[in-house]
């Protein structure tokens, strides 16, 4: 038969077959070249995406301290329990085992595991922030609970609950609007951000810098190894001017059922020593998932517990405004101490009649007694001598009608009316009756309690207008550097020291004379000076009054300015002044350790 | 004829290429199972199969071709019986009933069918060479192939059954059947495809749909196709290095020591490694055709053609599926994939080729 020969002389059919087979192999080589050499980098990218996961490492927020270094807001670990459904061979059994531990029903757990919306191989969070007991029980049953993952995240914790809640504020997940606004500053979806108070005003310092981790995972999403890691940097710490002891005293003494607010300033610096607004709230509600239902209550409460009345509340100043009228009268030379007006309890202006709050009348009163008795008739007479626009100008110099610049967002400005304002706003001239309302701090006048505190501070310190400051300093964690918040006057009143001394004297008598309107504010051993105010709200059928008491102490060398506002309070002297008295008494008693505030450490 | 002379006629190039592929196979089975706890067990088992394969190779080398020719129908019948046994008594694994268990061994009769069908076709076509112009010369082999093919499709094993048609056509072509008739049959077969579709299992239909567009089900049926292509493609020119393939080592590749061993190779050794392996296959296939061309008998020639085309089909379908140009079927890559039955079949095939090569000058 045939002899061995080269393939080139082969059977033609075998040659055809050879051609086909060579074509097949060449085709495969070509296709491989296409996939590996030409599109190689594309598939390298896909392979990298397959195995590399970026994990964001949340930075713990900076700690907020009071002025003496006591912690007000810190971070605690939250233990989140999640499971990787792909790793669980018997989901029903696992759900039955886990249900009692997590205080859920097994149906709930199964529903979560089988949710259509979940991403494959991404663990499903079953319960956030479980208790330590739950955590221990889960760790103990680890051997039978496959695929259960415990993750630790820093969560905000407010050590004193409701205490100073309006100053501290609270944190929450960044909203879509906030993200849109701040995303260029490195904010990220799912980030926590300050929502109120110092937490939002100083968020850029408090939030720190999130870290990140690139981990290599296998096909089931298990971490194989860490490729790179950048540790998160904790946010800067913030030291407040707030005095925890005073704040506790204020919280206790204001009365838990009262509504209103208290502001305490250091008149020599503008430092905010205490600030209270009632009703209040516990900021932990916003981070503690077990208390989620309370958030809705807070948001729908008609008492608006989240609203900081000290800076957002606009009220008629009432009688304390008489101090400004008095200063203008003295400074313009229209009045001196010797000038007296007779108060019969009534004041006639044209056909109208305006009453003094004291029906029988105060008799002949000079300016000091006018302040002491808060005699309306005295000021009705006085305002007739004065230029309204000049009084309004003086009020603005005291800071009324503009923001004080306190380090909180959204502060209200209040309103100081004058002739021009009335003409523009109401297309009406300024009537004599307007002056009557104006001089006793009613009518269109509106101030915030913090503005009131700034005004009293200026009277107490000799004319310096300070910008109130909640924060004393910021301590950056990386460089261990302190940023101090400057405390210099932002304005100075062009008022003679004699005038201010006279006003202070009047305020002293308000509290310390037997017939002063605020003798209830007297404190043994401490000389308090102040001014009461009771304002009537015209709106509504209800005969509603708010009670003011503005004051400073000690008289000779003022250390503290205290503004107390009790909404619905019957009288400044009888409702607000006693609160201030108790606060002073305990504040100046060095043995007082502060209040019984519900401490949850 | 002396023993020595016979050994001189052994095609050593073929054997060398086969052993190179077996070695590369072991290297990548090692890599593909490296992450397992007792991965060396897999290697030892494959080594054992290589040894058994060498014994099978030797038997096939020694066996009298004439004898094989004479018992071709018997082997075919026995194989049909085994396939029937699989359908009734086989063990279900990975959704398919392919295995028969004897003691500690699991056998896949569909693997051996690849050889037995080639033998019976060679026997029929060489016996009836005088009638090669007739339609029955095409139809009867067709029936011979269809019976086991349907049984294998029913297992269900689409990949293996797909091997038989190219083998049948190549053997008919080389035997000299009328090309026009052959073409007519192909056209008829193509028009019968919709009927064929109806016989497919749902998962097979899904695989074919996914083959056309893997992204219709990226985490289900399309997952394997996508991950395999990523593995091969990300290997680039030179690969990520042995044991360094992330697709492989991090388990993104399924079935990676069996059906998708080529993806592991592609990822870790890159285009260069793939090229080398394909060239080794090409040498084996060219050798197979040379042996066919030089065969001393028509039976030997047709058997060699059948075996060569059978190996070619495996390479095309398996390598093609790793890069998404072929649908995913559970077809192993000869000599490289882990698995005893496949290895045994391939070693028998090489043994037969060498047998035909040795006996080329024997009058018969």
Image: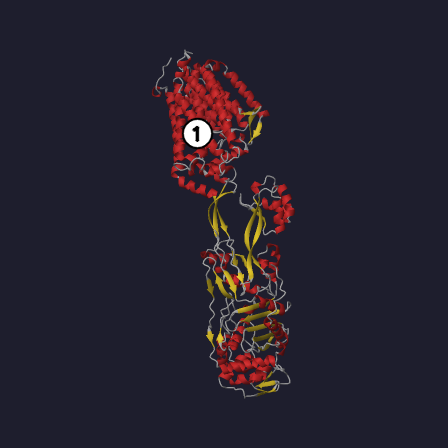
For label 1, the residue is B24
**Colouring style:** secondary structure
Badge 1 marks a residue whose secondary structure is helix
For residue A87, what is the image quadrant?
A: top right
- Whole-percent x, y for residue B29 in the image: 47, 31
Is B151 located above or below residue A52 in the figure? above
Query: Viewer-proximal residue, B237 or B81?
Result: B237
Is A509 located above or below residue A404 in the figure? below
Query: Viewer-proximal residue, B301 or A520?
Result: A520
Is B362 located above or below residue A67 in the figure? above
Is A439 located above or below residue B84 in the figure? below
Q: In which quarter of the image is the C terminus of chain A?
A: bottom right
Name the residue located 47 percent from the left edge and 26 percent from the top edge.
B163
- Whole-percent x, y for residue A238 in the image: 51, 62
Chain letter belonging to callout 1: B
For residue A437, what is the image quadrant?
A: bottom right
Viewer can see residue B181:
no
Q: Please identify the residue farthest to the front as the structure is shown.
A: A591
């Amino acid at each position: 038969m045939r002899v061995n020969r080269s393939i080139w002389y082969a059977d033609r059919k075998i040659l055809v077959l050879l051609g086909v087979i060579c074509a097949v192999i060449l085709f495969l080589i070509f296709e491989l070249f296409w996939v590996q050499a030409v599109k190689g980098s594309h598939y390298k990218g896909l392979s990298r995406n397959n195995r590399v996961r970026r994990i964001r490492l949340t930075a713990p927020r900076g700690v907020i301290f009071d002025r003496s270094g006591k912690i007000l807001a810190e971070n605690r670990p939250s233990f989140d329990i999640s499971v990787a459904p792909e790793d669980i061979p018997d989901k029903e059994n696992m759900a039955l085992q886990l249900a009692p531990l997590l205080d859920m029903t097994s149906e709930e757990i199964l529903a979560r595991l089988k949710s259509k919306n979940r991403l494959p191989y991404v663990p499903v969070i079953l319960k956030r922030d479980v208790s330590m007991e739950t955590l221990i029980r889960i760790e103990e049953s680890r051997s039978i609970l496959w695929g259960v993952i415990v993750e630790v995240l820093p969560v905000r914790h407010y050590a004193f609950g409701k205490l100073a809640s309006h100053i501290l504020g609270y944190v929450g997940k960044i909203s879509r609007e906030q993200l849109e606004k701040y995303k260029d500053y490195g904010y990220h979806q799912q980030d926590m951000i300050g929502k109120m108070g110092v937490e939002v005003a100083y968020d850029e310092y408090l939030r720190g810098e999130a870290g990140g981790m690139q981990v290599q995972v296998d096909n089931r999403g298990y971490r194989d190894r860490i490729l790179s890691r950048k540790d998160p940097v904790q946010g800067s710490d913030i030291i407040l001017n707030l005095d925890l002891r005073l704040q506790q005293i204020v919280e206790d003494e204001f009365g838990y059922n009262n509504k209103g607010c208290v502001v305490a300033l250091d008149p020599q610096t503008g430092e905010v020593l205490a600030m209270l607004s009632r009703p209040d709230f516990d900021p932990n509600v916003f981070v503690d998932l077990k208390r989620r239902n309370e958030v809705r209550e807070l948001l729908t409460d008609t008492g608006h517990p989240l609203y900081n009345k000290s800076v957002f509340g606009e009220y008629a100043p009432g009688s304390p405004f008489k101090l400004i009228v008095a200063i203008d009268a003295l400074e313009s030379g229209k009045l001196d101490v010797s000038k007296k007006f007779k108060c019969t309890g009534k004041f006639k202006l044209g056909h109208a009649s305006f009453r003094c709050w004291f029906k029988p009348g105060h008799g002949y009163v000079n300016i000091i007694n006018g302040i002491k008795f808060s005699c309306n008739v005295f000021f009705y007479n006085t305002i007739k001598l004065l230029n309204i626009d000049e009084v309004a100008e003086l009020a603005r110099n005291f800071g009324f009608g503009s923001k004080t610049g306190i380090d909180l967002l959204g502060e209200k400005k209040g309103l100081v009316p004058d002739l021009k304002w009335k003409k523009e706003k109401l297309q009406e001239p300024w009537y004599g009756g307007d002056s009557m309302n104006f001089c006793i701090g009613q009518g269109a006048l509106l101030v915030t309690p913090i503005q009131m505190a700034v005004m009293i501070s200026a009277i107490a310190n000799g004319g310096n207008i300070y910008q109130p400051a909640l924060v004393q300093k910021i301590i950056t964690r990386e460089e261990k550097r302190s940023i101090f918040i400057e405390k210099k006057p932002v304005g100075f009143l062009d008022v003679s020291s004699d005038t201010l001394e006279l006003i202070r004297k009047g305020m002293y008598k308000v509290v310390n004379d037997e017939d002063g309107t605020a003798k209830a504010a007297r404190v043994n051993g401490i000389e308090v000076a102040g001014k009461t105010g009771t304002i009537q709200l015209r709106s509504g059928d209800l005969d509603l009054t708010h009670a003011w008491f503005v004051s400073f102490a000690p008289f000779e060398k003022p250390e503290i300015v205290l503004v107390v506002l009790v909404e619905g309070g019957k009288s400044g002297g009888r409702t607000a002044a006693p609160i201030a008295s108790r606060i002073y008494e305990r504040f100046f008693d060095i043995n007082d350790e502060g209040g019984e505030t519900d401490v949850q450490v | 004829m002396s023993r020595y002379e016979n050994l001189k006629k052994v095609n050593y190039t073929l054997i060398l290429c086969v052993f190179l592929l077996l070695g590369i196979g072991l290297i990548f089975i090692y890599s593909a199972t490296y992450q397992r706890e007792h991965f060396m067990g897999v290697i030892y088992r494959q080594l054992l199969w290589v040894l058994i394969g060498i014994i099978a190779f030797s038997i096939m080398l020694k066996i009298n071709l004439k004898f094989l020719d004479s018992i071709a129908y018997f082997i075919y019948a026995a194989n049909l019986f085994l396939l029937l046994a699989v359908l009734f008594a086989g063990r279900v694994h990975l959704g398919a009933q392919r295995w028969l268990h004897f003691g500690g061994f699991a056998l896949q009769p569909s693997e051996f069918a690849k050889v037995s069908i080639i033998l019976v076709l060679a026997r029929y076509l060489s016996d009836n060479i005088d009638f090669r112009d007739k339609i029955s010369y095409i139809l009867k082999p067709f029936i011979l192939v269809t019976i086991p093919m349907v049984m294998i499709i029913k297992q269900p094993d689409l990949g293996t059954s797909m091997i038989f048609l190219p083998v049948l056509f190549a053997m008919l072509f080389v035997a000299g059947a009328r090309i026009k008739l052959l073409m007519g049959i192909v056209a008829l077969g193509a028009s019968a495809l919709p009927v064929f579709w109806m016989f497919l299992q749902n998962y097979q239909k899904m695989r074919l749909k996914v083959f056309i567009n893997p992204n219709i089900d990226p985490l289900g049926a399309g997952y394997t196709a996508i991950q395999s292509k990523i593995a091969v493609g990300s290997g680039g020119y030179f690969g990520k290095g042995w044991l360094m393939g992330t697709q492989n080592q991090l388990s993104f590749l399924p079935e990676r020591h069996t059906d998708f061993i080529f993806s592991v190779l592609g990822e870790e050794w890159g285009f260069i490694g793939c090229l080398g392996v394909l060239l080794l296959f090409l040498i084996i296939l060219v050798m197979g055709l040379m042996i066919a061309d030089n065969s001393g008998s028509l039976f030997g020639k047709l058997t060699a053609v059948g075996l060569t085309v059978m190996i070619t089909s495996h390479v095309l379908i398996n390598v093609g599926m790793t890069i998404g140009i072929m649908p995913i079927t559970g077809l192993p890559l000869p000599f490289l994939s882990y698995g005893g039955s496949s290895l045994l079949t391939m070693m028998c095939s090489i043994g037969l080729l060498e047998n035909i090569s040795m006996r080329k000058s024997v009058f018969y």
